[in-house]
Image (cartoon, rainbow, N blue to C red):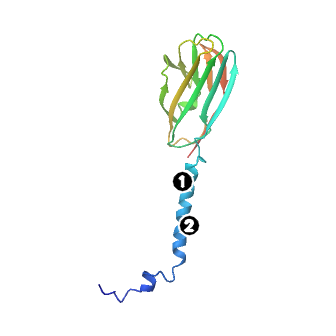
Amino acid sequence: MTAVDQSLDLGRTRDLEGRAWQPWLRRALLALVAVPVVLAATGAFGQATESTTASANGARMRLEAPGVLRGGLMWRTRVVIRASRRIDDPRVILGPGFAEGMQLNTIAPSPESEASRGPRIVLSYPALDPGDELVVYLQLQVNPTTVGDEDMNVEFDDATDPLVRIDHTTSALP
């Protein structure tokens, strides 16, 4: 067995005499760092999905989208449209917040065509008969530098005639 260096104070270095409060300080600081991680994991900082429904002019639309997001977060939204009459030229119009400050990764099913109306994205789909349902999935990611409220309104039109609209705002946290 090796000899103990006589310059070491075994009580202080091995037995932690006189330092009883220091481990508790380290534990408290670690717990303080862990609090935001636990809150984020439980959904306190965004991505809880809200569902909003509206009906008008022969169409019923439901929007499922989060109300609060964090920078860099990947998320999805779903738009469900049920036609109660024939709609010859269905168009899903996405608010400017779907493009500004976000990365629009995927749209499924793919629209027949994509266009714009000013800052809004217009997705065109095939005609819908009464009882038909169109479900559009969007996969997005928040740009890390985006902070504040984003206009995530969704409108459903027959060509250029507005049928139903859902107003939705999503807040992006830093």
In the image, residue 78 lies at what x, y percent?
A: 57, 29
User: Can you say whether 16 is above or below 95 in the image?
Assistant: below
| Mark 2 element type | helix
Which residue appears farthest toward the left when viewing the image? 1
Residue drawn 51% across and 19% down? 115
Q: Is residue 54 left or right of residue 118?
A: right
- Which residue is denoted by mark 1 in the rendering? 37
144 or 20: which is nearer to us?
A: 20
In the image, residue 150 lies at what x, y percent?
A: 60, 35
Instruction: Identify the amino acid type marked 2.
Output: Ala
Return the mark for residue 28. 2
Return the mark for residue 77. none
Q: Is residue 167 visible?
A: no
Residue drawn 69% across and 25% down? 54
State how many labels appear.
2
Q: Quadrant of the N terminus?
A: bottom left
Instruction: Identify the amino acid type marked 1.
Output: Val
Crowd class of label 1 (few under 14; some 14 to 19; many from 20; radius 10 Å): few
